[in-house]
């Protein structure tokens, strides 16, 4: 093959041709005696003559290509007939028949998918590259196909195929990707282990949650959620987001979640829980910002009482599909300090659904945050079914995929509207207590009648009356009006609660043989499945106990 007839259309060819033209013009000017001033001043008779440096066009092309370590093949014409392969190509794949079609002579180019690329290069006249494609010899190559032309030839179109061995790079990249996948799996496992493995199931609510890690890198975020049964039929629901990504964010998230569960056992109002979390977050890491919303559901009130530290608003959908947004009050994120949080409330009547979520569900780079929340409201308005179904629908409507660039946590709770036989398993009864010697006998008679109407077995009936008597007696002795007795049954437990106007919380203690008091709470703690007390909004306290019902 005569390579002097071929000239490759490689980048820079036109610049080199222009440079050669400029050199020729400069030589003509020098022949006329016109010399650039800078050069003329420096030129002397003693300067040695410039060495004769050969131009790249004078180099023997075939000798150069034969010595190139990369694989080189030259194809000619519309059928891509083989015109040349260099020594490296022969060493890699053996000798090839010149003049044969590439599909027959170079089958090793079929597996990387190079043949369609040859046609594209000839039609467009532009080079194309395929990066890191594995060949039949098991090695990886980067293929560059460049259009060439042949002068004084019937069909001057051709393609120069240049293949660089990148096996080491490809294997290193593969090991890196495998390491990143392993690190991500480890990080996601850490993240999920810090989240509740199984949500607690309140008597009066149906709950479901989902978590989607964002992106494909190993760094996970600090999104978290939890459901905590407080006793007395009340339930705490919390969701939060630690800003940033990585193990540090996940560690801070784990500490905050643990702290919330501990503070929840104190049965404090939502704003007091956030006040404690705010101080803890500053101690953990003053530079780590976290948002959180903490809400409490009391089935007797039919409302969500909540407090928010810089978090997105709770959304509540009623039976008719109308969605309300709990906007106020909202304080700054946790860890900022110097802020007094306050609690707000939003109605959660039977048949309604509430959604707590993190910003990954609604925040997009090309949209305003309010637009994302409005879109979520529209999606929630038409989302029916169980809490898990609602979770899945909201995730789909927000376009969350495995490649989503931010973590997403969603917590859905429903207050079901019970009817028929199911409604009979959820009953309430209350009695206002007046001071005096007749208050305790009246409370016992009321409890006995209610428990009988609820068809409890004799042993549970008697235990319930005894617990009522002790709680009422304790309130009459140590509390102040107004006083109230409340009985509640669910499908799983009997709850007895007494409220009064004194905010001093009782505690269980050992009564000495000579003491005339101090045994009431000890008796309640012994016969009941659990008991507790809390301060009520506006002053006063509530003391309650529970009896777990045996399944029939």
Image (cartoon, helix red, strand yellow):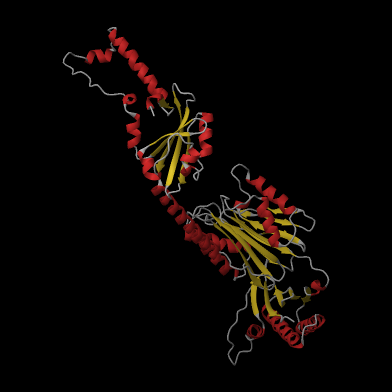
Relative side of 91 to 47, left or right: right
Relative side of 487 to 291, left or right: right
Q: Tell me the quarter of the picture where residue 333 sits.
A: bottom right
Tell me: residue 25, above or below residue 238: above
Q: Residue furthest bottom?
A: 513
Residue for point 66% across, 85% down:
527
Q: Residue furthest top?
A: 32
Residue 453 percent location from the top left of the image: 82, 81
Tell me: residue 312, above or below residue 36: below
Front residue of this view, candidates 365 and 442? 365
Residue 347 seen from this side: no
Residue 499 seen from this side: yes
Residue 118 percent location from the top left of the image: 50, 35
Residue 404 percent location from the top left of the image: 58, 50
Front residue of this view, candidates 514 and 395? 395
Image quadrant containing the C terminus: bottom right
Front residue of this view, candidates 159 and 486? 159
Relative side of 338 to 53, left or right: right
Q: Tell me the quarter of the picture where residue 484 sits.
A: bottom right
Residue for point 60% across, 59% down:
211
Front residue of this view, candidates 95 and 7? 95
Relative side of 93 to 250, left or right: left
Q: Residue furthest right?
A: 420
Tell me: residue 313, above or below residue 195: above
Residue 545 percent location from the top left of the image: 68, 78
Image quadrant containing the N terminus: top left
Circle count = 0
């Amino acid at each position: 093959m005569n390579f002097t007839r071929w000239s490759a259309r490689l980048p820079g060819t036109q610049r080199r041709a222009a440079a050669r033209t400029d050199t020729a013009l400069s030589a003509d000017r020098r022949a006329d005696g016109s010399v650039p001033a800078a050069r003329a001043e420096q030129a002397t008779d003693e300067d040695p003559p410039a060495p004769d440096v050969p131009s790249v066009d004078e180099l023997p092309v075939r000798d150069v290509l034969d010595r190139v370590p990369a694989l080189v093949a030259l194809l000619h014409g519309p059928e891509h007939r083989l015109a040349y392969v260099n020594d490296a190509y022969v060493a890699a794949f053996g000798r090839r028949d010149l003049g044969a079609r590439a599909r027959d002579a170079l089958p090793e180019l079929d597996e990387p998918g190079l043949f369609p690329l040859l046609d594209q290069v000839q039609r467009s006249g532009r080079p194309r590259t395929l990066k890191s494609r594995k060949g039949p010899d098991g090695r990886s190559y980067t293929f560059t196909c460049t259009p060439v032309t042949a002068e004084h030839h019937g069909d001057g179109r051709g393609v120069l195929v240049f293949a660089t061995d990148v096996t080491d790079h490809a294997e290193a990249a593969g090991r890196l990707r495998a390491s990143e996948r392993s690190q991500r799996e480890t990080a996601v496992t850490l993240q999920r282990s810090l989240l509740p493995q199984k949500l607690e199931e309140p008597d009066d609510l149906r709950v479901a949650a989902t978590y989607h890690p964002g992106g494909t890198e190993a760094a996970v975020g600090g999104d978290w959620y939890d459901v905590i049964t407080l006793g007395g039929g009340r339930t705490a629901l919390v969701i939060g987001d630690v800003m940033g990504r990585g193990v540090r964010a996940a560690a801070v998230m784990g500490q905050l979640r643990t702290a919330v569960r501990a503070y929840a056992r104190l049965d404090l109002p939502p704003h007091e829980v956030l006040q404690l979390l705010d101080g803890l977050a500053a101690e953990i890491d003053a530079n780590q910002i976290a948002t959180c919303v903490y809400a409490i559901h009391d089935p007797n009130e039919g409302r969500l009482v909540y407090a928010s530290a810089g978090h997105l608003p709770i959304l509540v959908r009623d039976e008719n599909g109308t969605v309300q947004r709990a906007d106020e009050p909202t304080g700054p994120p946790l860890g900022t300090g110097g802020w007094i949080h306050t609690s707000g409330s939003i109605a959660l009547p039977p048949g309604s659904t509430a959604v707590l979520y993190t910003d990954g569900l609604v925040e997009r780079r090309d949209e305003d945050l309010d637009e994302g929340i409005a879109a979520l409201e529209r999606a929630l308005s038409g989302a029916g079914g169980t809490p898990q179904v609602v979770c899945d629908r909201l995730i789909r409507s927000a376009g969350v995929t495995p490649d989503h660039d931010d973590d997403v946590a969603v917590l859905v709770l429903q207050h079901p509207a019970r009817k028929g036989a199911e409604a009979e398993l959820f009953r309430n009864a209350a009695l206002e207590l007046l001071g005096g010697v007749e208050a305790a006998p009246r409370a016992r008679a009321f409890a006995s009648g209610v428990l009988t109407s609820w068809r409890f077995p004799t042993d549970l009936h008697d235990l319930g009356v005894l617990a009522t008597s002790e709680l009422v007696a304790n309130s009459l002795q140590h509390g102040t009006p107004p006083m109230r007795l409340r009985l509640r049954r669910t499908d799983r437990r009997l709850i007895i609660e007494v409220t009064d106007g004194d905010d001093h919380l009782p505690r269980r203690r050992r009564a000495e043989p000579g003491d005339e008091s101090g045994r009431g709470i000890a008796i309640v703690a012994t016969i009941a499945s659990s008991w507790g007390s809390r301060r009520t909004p506006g002053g006063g306290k509530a003391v309650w106990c529970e009896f777990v019902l045996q399944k029939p």
